Amino acid sequence: MEQTPLRIKQAEADLRECIRRAAVWDSSCEAAAAHLAGAMAEFGIQRRQMVRRLRALGLSPRGAARLARGAWRSLRDRQKAEHERQFDGATPICPHCLGPLGPLDHFCPKCCGPVSAHASIDPLGRIYSTGRAYREAMSAKPRLVVLLGVWLIFGPSLVLFPLALYDQVRMVVHVRLVGLGDAVPSSDVLSGFLQSALLWCWMLLISGILWKMTARWIRFRRTGA
């Protein structure tokens, strides 16, 4: 087991001496306890263990928990400030091509990849980001998680589209067979045919995308590339 560093031992001794000298808990005892909690936080002692050690020195459960929470919060703030000072003035780079980015760039000027949250929130940027994601899914090395995601997005369409097409075709055939052709305007019949044609084209497109991704994943898996 790793030994307690000298700084924590000294802080504990100072807190005991302060408690012994003070008749009541005063600001000097509070400062000594905060110093001990900060030393334990910097050493990496967990909050629960810090509370136990502080309570063993005579602190109340609520006070020990408050000091441990404040010590960890102060340590995180100092680490965050140090991290910001370290990277202050550094040039951001694109996560896709590692090219330099400007402070107002939402898309990389080199590879046009989205690099900020605004690229996915803006209406036009969202369309471009979605199209780029689909294009990378089709052109990059296929992965199982990407393949499953594409099937979850487009797979249900293969079940819904035939049902919609069947309803439209049945409606048109029913109108012609029953003899309601005069009652139904020709524009409605033409609109039904156009909708059926568009649905068929969309279903063929989705089927081609799914087939291409699945075939590429199977081929890469067989060849081990």
Image (tube, rainbow, N blue to C red):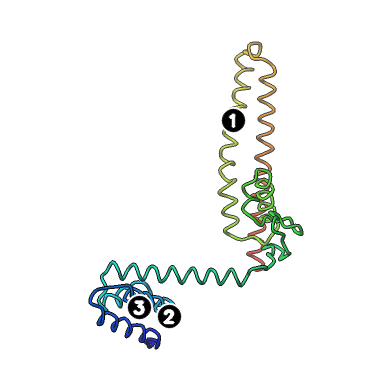
Q: Nearer the viewer, mark 3 or mark 1?
A: 3
Up the image or down, 142 lies above or below 27; here it is: above
Q: Secondary structure at mark 2?
A: helix
Q: Residues within 10 Å of mark 1 (few under 14, many from 20)?
A: few
Residue at horizontal 31 percent and vertical 71 percent from the top: 64
Q: Using the numbered discs, state the Cα–Cα distance from disc 2 to disc 3 in whole angstroms.
A: 17 Å
**Is residue 90 toward the left or the right of residue 68 in the image?**
right
| Amino acid on which disc 2 is placed | Phe
Q: Are marks 3 and 1 in contact (CB under 8 Å)?
A: no
* Residue 32, label in figure: 3
| Amino acid on which disc 1 is placed | Tyr
Q: Earlier in the sequence, mark 2 or mark 3?
A: 3
Q: Using the numbered discs, state the Cα–Cα distance from disc 1 to disc 2 in whole angstroms.
A: 70 Å
Up the image or down, 34 lies above or below 129; here it is: below
Label 1 belongs to which residue? Answer: 166
Up the image or down, 55 lies above or below 145; here it is: below
**Is residue 105 toward the left or the right of residue 168 in the image?**
right
Closer to us: 83 or 29: 29
Residue at the top extreme of this rendering: 182
**Quarter occupied by the N terminus:** bottom left
| Amino acid on which disc 3 is placed | Ala
**Could you tell me residue 78's position as x and y percent?**
50, 71
